[in-house]
Image (cartoon, rainbow, N blue to C red):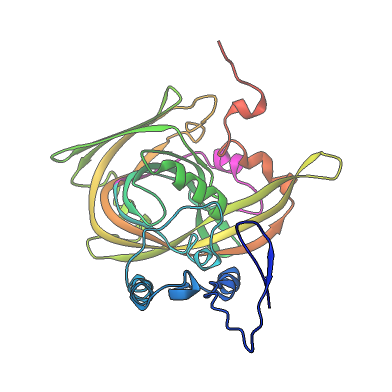
Amino acid sequence: MILEKQADHTEVTILADAVILSMGYRPDTSLVDELNAKGIPAVAVGSAVKDGTIAPATRSGYEAARALFTEKKKETAFYTPKSDISNFGKVSLMDEQEGLYLAYLTDPQAIARILPPPLKPFSMPVVTLSVCHIHKPTFADDYYEAILGVYATYGKSLGLYPVGLVLGGPGAEMAVQCGRDNGSIPKKLGAEFVIRRNDNTVTAGVTRRGTQLVDIHMELGQYNSPLTHALYQNPGNGKQVFGGGFYFHFDRMPDENGVSHFVNGALLQNLCEYNYQSWEPGTASLTLNSSLDDPWAELPINTIVGGAYSRNSLLVHKLNLVEKLDAEEIVPYLLTGRYDRTAFMETGRI
């Protein structure tokens, strides 16, 4: 056997009948790495990490086993594990929402002018307005929301077509993104809300970009008209009612020459479940105003039907494709509810 001296690197020849080498163990984590790469959680312990004595080996095994039953702090990453995808937008529940609901009659021609085909105006020109604080939504922090809508029909189906929604509060940004991206709902950010109740007097104001769009005064006790109760399907404490709405989807995509087109037009319809904790009828007065960006007074107030102050929970059960449409034909009806005039190069900066 030939050996080399470390001091001067000279070689020495030694005669031997047998040679025994004691070189220790080399850690090997290749199996753990392979399992983790396939998305199978695996942890190396003991000598697979570092060769040593039995004590640290058993300790590392104990730590790995304990971690199986310890709640881990969720780490944020730009890559979302596939196991999380099924929870994305899974439940759309506006829990513990509270605010004012009212309806009024407008000019039938005004509804016909803004209603996208193939929807048809309902036989009664009803406009609904709600101003609410959603305390516990499943998809965002709490936020405020005002909804202006009209009743419309598609074939034999009756539903609410929301002309515009404006939002404010801590969870407004996520509520807008989830509503627009997942539900094709015409939502806008940047609204300021004031909802106040003093005994049986409730007031609500909604302002956006310097214009007070909504001003409501309501005295609780009785409706302006008893028709209100039937219009809202006879709501009350502990009552459950169902309804639905119509929404229009479109995308804007560039072609191979860099020219953008409106595509993927579609009419959607959802099913909603209302569970009422309270419903207090009220006599309402209402003023609507328009701005360059939000024409909320375009549907004139002819007769106020009535309203109420309510606490309820709203659950959206499903959203269905009703009909595919030519996006270019419906887009003229849809942009104002989603974009301000700045998107049309009208900044008006001073």
Stretch of the chain drawn in magenta: 99-120
Along the horizontal axis of the image, is 340 left or right of 252?
Answer: left
What x and y, as percent, mark residue 99? 29, 45
Along the horizontal axis of the image, is 327 left or right of 180?
Answer: right
Q: Is residue 107 magenta?
A: yes
Most extreme residue toward the top is 350
Q: Nearer the viewer, residue 169 or 304?
A: 169
Q: Nearer the viewer, residue 150 or 334?
A: 334
What x and y, as percent, mark residue 115? 60, 45
Quarter holding the N terminus is: bottom right
Quarter holding the C terminus is: top right
Above or below, 325 relative to 240: above
Residue sitting at x 66%, y 27%: 344
Most extreme residue toward the right is 257
Along the horizontal axis of the image, is 194 left or right of 165?
Answer: left
Q: Nearer the viewer, residue 254 or 222?
A: 254
- Is residue 216 in sight in this rendering? no
Q: Is residue 64 magenta?
A: no
Residue sitting at x 51%, y 31%: 294
What x and y, as percent, mark residue 315? 39, 62
- Is residue 85 in sight in this rendering? yes
Above or below, 236 relative to 174: below
The part of the image, by quadrant, that contains residue 3 is bottom right
Q: Total label count?
A: 0
Residue sitting at x 36%, y 58%: 73
Above or below, 72 relative to 100: below
